[in-house]
Image (cartoon, rainbow, N blue to C red):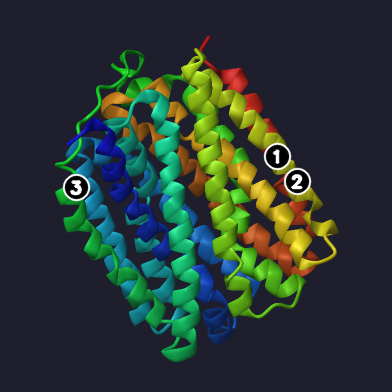
């Protein structure tokens, strides 16, 4: 196969991201229905998300280590089978405790999602291409959210909200044989010389590692909030129906996808012009952090169209920054520990979801969403300061 065809192989791998996000986001898409059935308020829905964050936090480094030990193909396939089966099990539950437990089991497998896509980029793509490759995982987010919205709306109207989990989970098993076929069709890239020789202990001892993690925690508020709470925001702020509010998710993710590819393209162009890769990515992260401050203006929006435009721009900026931040550990460490290095950033996402989700629900129940829009707008700039403070000199 021509080496340029590796992009098709990587694209097939990143379909696993679609399944990952579909199984994750389907809960949010049907959440108004199960909240009504169980009598939950927004704070209690936030507790659901916090539980996912706790399990995701604990599982992320373990799954990163697991992927590096057993390999990309077997590790990703086992993780995907796990979260698909656990996702379907949510549909068998009759009580709140069962739904909580099975959703936590989903988080264990899904913690392998982002580290596996990073390891795939490190395995099959050249160094300057890896941010573009990571951007392809955003296609998975767009597809996953689009499917989640339509599957949830159809299932809630025809078979009940539990049936959505069976439809979403059953799609995962189709990917595994497709990937085992595709993985034999592309050449593996050699790791960049500067990214060889780091083991887990070495990665954990580097200050820049914790700069990556802290920057991720401080910058993910935009992603966390607008991914998990968009339908609730529009439903409660502008009195939209659940079905119509769900349909705003896919175009929002499409705009995010454009931001991700633009961020990957910018870093590739800077690297081709001679910039040190990690320096180029840091600069683009700063641009994204500035753009994310637009979220503070959302409460001033007088109508749905302007609110959606401001949310979209801040989400665009979030993806611009994130795709470069998640590629920095590959520049810094790469090699045999690629999945573990990136898993530390996904653990940071778990930290934020654990700490913030219940608080978001508590504030939304009592003060609405305006304070939250302001609170998530400026921390990414603090994240940039951590990147500068801890960078390798």
Specify few, some or many for label 1: CA neighbours under 10 Å numbering under 14, 14-19, or 20 or more.
many
Badge nearest the viewer, 3 or 1: 3
Asked whether 393 or 285 is in front, the reply is 285
Q: Where does residue 183 sit, x and y in percent of width and height?
A: 18, 43
Q: Are marks 1 and 2 in contact (CB under 8 Å)?
A: yes
Task: State the residue at coordinates (55%, 46%).
Answer: 258
Asked whether 297 or 108 is in front, the reply is 297
Asked whether 7 or 80 is in front, the reply is 7
Q: Which residue matches tag 3?
A: 182
Task: State the residue at coordinates (76%, 70%).
Answer: 237
Q: Which residue matches tag 1?
A: 291
Assign a secondary structure to mark 2: helix
Which residue of the protein is positioned furthest toward the bottom in this rendering? 158
Task: State the residue at coordinates (45%, 42%).
Answer: 135
Assign a secondary structure to mark 1: helix
Q: Which residue matches tag 2?
A: 294
């Amino acid at each position: 196969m021509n080496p340029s065809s590796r992009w098709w192989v990587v694209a097939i791998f990143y379909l696993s991201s679609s399944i990952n996000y579909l199984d994750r986001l389907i809960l949010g898409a049907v959440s108004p229905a199960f909240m009504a059935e169980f009598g939950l308020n927004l704070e209690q829905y936030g507790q659901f998300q916090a539980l996912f964050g706790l399990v995701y936090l604990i599982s992320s480094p373990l799954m990163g280590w697991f992927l590096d030990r057993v390999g990309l193909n077997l590790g990703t396939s086992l993780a995907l089978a796990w979260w698909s089966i656990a996702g379907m099990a949510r549909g068998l539950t009759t009580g709140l405790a069962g739904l909580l437990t099975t959703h936590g089991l989903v988080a264990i497998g899904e913690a392998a999602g982002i580290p596996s896509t990073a390891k795939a980029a490190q395995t099959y793509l050249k160094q300057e291409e890896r941010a573009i490759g990571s951007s392809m995982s955003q296609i998975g987010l767009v597809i996953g959210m689009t499917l989640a919205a339509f599957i949830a709306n159809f299932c809630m109207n025809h078979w009940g909200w539990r049936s959505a989990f069976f439809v979403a989970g059953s799609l995962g098993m189709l990917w595994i044989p497709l990937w085992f076929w595709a993985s034999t069709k592309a050449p593996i890239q050699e790791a960049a010389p500067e990214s060889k020789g780091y083991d887990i202990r070495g990665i954990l001892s580097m200050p820049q590692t914790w700069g990556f993690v802290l920057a991720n925690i401080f910058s993910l508020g935009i992603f966390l909030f607008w991914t998990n709470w968009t339908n609730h925001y529009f439903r409660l702020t502008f009195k939209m129906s659940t079905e119509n509010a769900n349909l705003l998710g896919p175009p929002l993710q499409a705009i995010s996808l454009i931001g991700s590819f633009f961020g990957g393209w910018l870093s590739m162009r800077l690297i081709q012009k001679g910039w040190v890769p990690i320096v180029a990515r840091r600069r683009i992260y700063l641009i994204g952090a500035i753009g994310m401050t637009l979220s503070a203006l959302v409460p001033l929006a007088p109508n749905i169209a302007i609110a959606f435009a401001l949310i979209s721009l801040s989400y665009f900026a979030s993806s611009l920054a994130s795709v470069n931040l998640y590629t920095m550990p590959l520049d810094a460490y790469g090699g045999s520990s690629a999945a573990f290095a990136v898993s530390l950033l996904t653990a940071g996402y778990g930290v934020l979801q654990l700490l913030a989700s219940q608080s978001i629900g508590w504030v939304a129940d009592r003060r609405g969403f305006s304070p939250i829009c302001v609170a998530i707008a400026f921390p990414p700039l603090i994240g940039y300061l951590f990147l500068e403070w801890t960078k390798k000199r």
